[in-house]
Amino acid sequence: MERLQIAMRDVALPDGAEAAIRAEAARLNSFYDRLVSCRVLVETPHRHLREGALYNVRIDLTLPGGELVVKRQPEKDLLSAIQRAFEAARRRLEDYARVQRGAVKATGKPARARVVRLFPYEGYGFLEAAGGREIYDHRNSVLNGGFDRMEVGTVVRFTEEEGERGPQASSVAPAGGRRRQKGGTTA
C-alpha cells in the first residue's frame, strides 16, 4: 500500500489505538496487495451523558479501478470499533477480489437496496445494499426514466454489475414502498 492516512475528529487516540490501526491496515494490505491507499477516520459522532463517548470508524480503501467505503455503527469501545470496521473492510475486500477474479456469477435475480444519496443535477446517486455496501447508481440505469422520481429512502430492485470504478447498479426500479429508519420515521 502506498499510503495510510489516519485522521481524528473530536477525539484523541489513546495509546495503542494508532498501532492497532496500522497493524489492521497492514493485514489488509497483505491480504490484497494492490491497495493504493487506506484512509481511516476515527470520530465521536455522539456524546451521551449516560453512555459516554461512542466511537465511529470509517475506512476508505482506494483500489485499482474502484474505492470501497466501510462505515460501522458507533461503539463504546474504540479498539472494538477499529477491529469491527477492519473486519468489515476485509469482507468487502474479499468480495471485491472475487469479482475481479471473475469468481462471482450473477444470479439473475434483482437485489434490493435503499437510496442513500442523490445528486439529481449531476444525474447519479448511491444505493445501500445488504451489509451496508454502497453501490453507484446513474440516471441511465433507472428504468422508465424514473431517476427524477427517486428520493432518499426509496427502496429499489437492481442488478449489480462491475463498473469502471467498482460496483454499480443497472436495471434499477422502485420496489414499492420505503423502509422505516430507526426511530419510526421514514427516510
Image (spheres, rainbow, N blue to C red):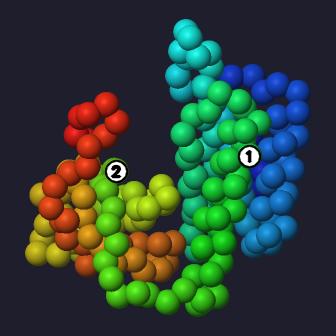
Q: Does residue 157 sit above or below 132 in this rendering?
A: below
Can the viewer see residue 64? no
Residue located 26% across and 43% down the image? 180
Can the viewer see residue 161? yes
Left/right of residue 6 with respect to residue 55 in the rendered view: right
x, y percent for residue 36: 72, 64
Residue located 60% across and 89% down the image? 103
Q: CA distance from mark 1 to mark 2?
A: 25 Å
> Which image quarter holds the N terminus?
bottom right
x, y percent for residue 151: 20, 51
Camera-side mark, 1 or 2: 1
Residue located 42% across and 80% down the image? 161
Q: Does residue 77 sit above or below 110 in this rendering?
A: above
The residue type indicated by label 1 comes to Gln
Residue nearest the viewer, comparing 54 with 164: 54
**Mark 2 highlights which residue?**
116
Q: Secondary structure at mark 1?
A: helix
> Which image quarter holds the C terminus?
top left
Left/right of residue 48 with respect to residue 21 in the rendered view: left
The residue type indicated by label 2 comes to Val
Whether residues under marks 1 and 2 lie with C-beta atoms below 8 angstroms apart, the answer is: no
Question: Based on the displayed image, in which of its 4 quarters is residue 80 positioned?
Answer: top right
x, y percent for residue 69: 56, 55
Question: Based on the displayed image, in which of its 4 quarters is residue 106 positioned?
Answer: bottom left
x, y percent for residue 50: 56, 11
Q: Secondary structure at mark 2?
A: strand
Crowdedness of circle 2 by 10 Å Cα count: few (<14), some, many (20+)?
some
Question: Based on the displayed image, in which of its 4 quarters is residue 45 positioned?
Answer: top right
Residue nearest the viewer, comparing 29 with 72: 72
**Mark 1 highlights which residue?**
83
